Amino acid sequence: MSSGGRAAQLKHTGLRPGWTTGACATAATTAAYTALLTGEFPDPVTITLPKGQTPSFALAVESLDAGTDPNAGTGAGTGAGSATAGVVKDAGDDPDVTHGALIRSTVRLLPAGSGVVFRAGPGVGTVTLPGLPLEVGEPAINPVPRQLMREHVAEVAARHGGTGDVEITVSVDNGAEIARSTWNPRIGILGGLSILGTTGVVVPYSCSAWIDSIRRGVDVARAGGLTHVAGCTGSTSERTVTELYELPEIALLDMGDFAGAVLKYVRRHPVDRLTLCGGFAKLSKLAAGHLDLHSARSQVDKGFLAALARTGGASEALAAEIAAANTGLAALRLCEAAGVPLGDLVAARARDEALAVLRGAPVAVDVICIDRAGTVVGRSALAGPGAGDLPGA
């Protein structure tokens, strides 16, 4: 669903959106760096999110610590060694385990040319296993929040005469305890939470509301005369299918984790062609027969992936490595290195599972698996009733 569709959904349900940990960390970083350069904390502090929203955040913590300024004499900095600002996360009406958490950012000036360096403070996890979008040893601050903080650091530097060379240490009060309620320890993020968010906004959907929005999306597409729709797990997959097929926005169904909801509704309200696009790990769950792809209700089955890889030529040694892999993405990378087309195998099996749910409805299906960057890592052929008469068959 587009951002406008999400806004309409929230207005209809009366649910209040909130802010991601990444947005809160960006606000705290912006305030702390501003204080380092000017001696004053902006309160509230306003940031710009990836889709253009400009929320303001009240500061719960502010501290300016004396120390040596590595840029002394350059006109950048106040002479303070570091500054800390903190924001309390408001998740709106979403039942988020991090709602009410105090997210702090401590910013320290670095010598010119150092760039922006990220550190994990107390309550923020560290990546300890491969297969995640960050290297082993990196703080669990995801790529989009990192970019958002870099952009705001650059804006503050330009406004107040800084160099933009800083160390940013993000921490979350009681984050290690909160993280026990997440999947972080199982996937090798140890010591605390991840700093997350791709849009900065937490959209509170109940399952019934989200499923209803999927159904309305199908209705709108059919009413508009569209014969090809795409069920997407998120904004990256929406972008991928848009680039591949030049589909209009109303053809994009915000499937999220609810693959079953899309398939069951399209079974009763068919379109000629349905493309399913999402992350490799999520679609491997569909390939294994799961219709709800949420991490709390289905898990990536590495044993299933190992068995599937064997059908594509994987050796027993490689299959054993796949079965022991930390994540689905790590299993995929092992197969890519060995020349085993696990991405295509998962896409084809997911397509076949989708066709089984459709039960002969006049809908042709293809599946596209992507990685976190949006690169296509697996793709099925188009199959199902009428597939031979459609483009791309």
Image (tube, rainbow, N blue to C red):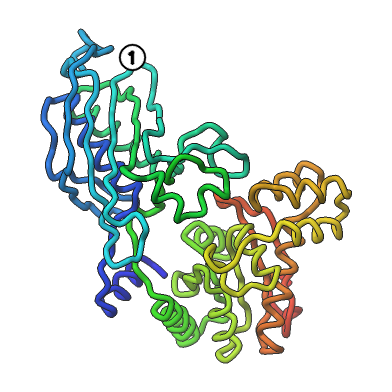
* Quadrant of the image containing the C terminus: bottom right
Q: x%, y% of residue 105?
A: 29, 35
- Residue placed at 33% from the left, 22% from the top? 165
**Left or right of 100: which side holds 59?**
left
Q: x%, y% of residue 149?
A: 33, 38
**Helix, strand or loop status at disc 1:** loop
| Quarter location, residue 352 | bottom right
Count of marks, rendered view: 1
Q: x%, y% of residue 124?
A: 40, 40
> In the image shown, does 372 or 251 lie closer to the viewer?
372
- Residue placed at 40% from the left, 30% from the top? 119
In this view, the residue farthest toward the bottom is 268
Give the crowd class for mark 1: few <14, some 14-19, many >=20 residues within 10 Å.
some
> In the image shown, does 188 or 318 lie closer to the viewer?
188
Q: x%, y% of residue 131?
A: 62, 44
Amino acid carrying label 1: it is Pro
- Residue placed at 12% from the left, 42% from the top? 43
Q: Which residue is mark 1?
A: 111
Instruction: Establish if 156 lies above or below 111.
Output: below
**Left or right of 56: which side holds 299?**
right
Instruction: Establish if 37 lies above or below 352.
Output: above
> In the image shown, does 336 or 97 lie closer to the viewer?
97
**Left or right of 86: which side holds 5?**
right
- Residue placed at 46% from the left, 51% from the top? 180
* Quadrant of the image containing the N terminus: bottom left
In this view, the residue farthest toward the top is 73
> In the image shown, does 25 or 55 lie closer to the viewer?
25
**Left or right of 163: which side holds 222?**
right
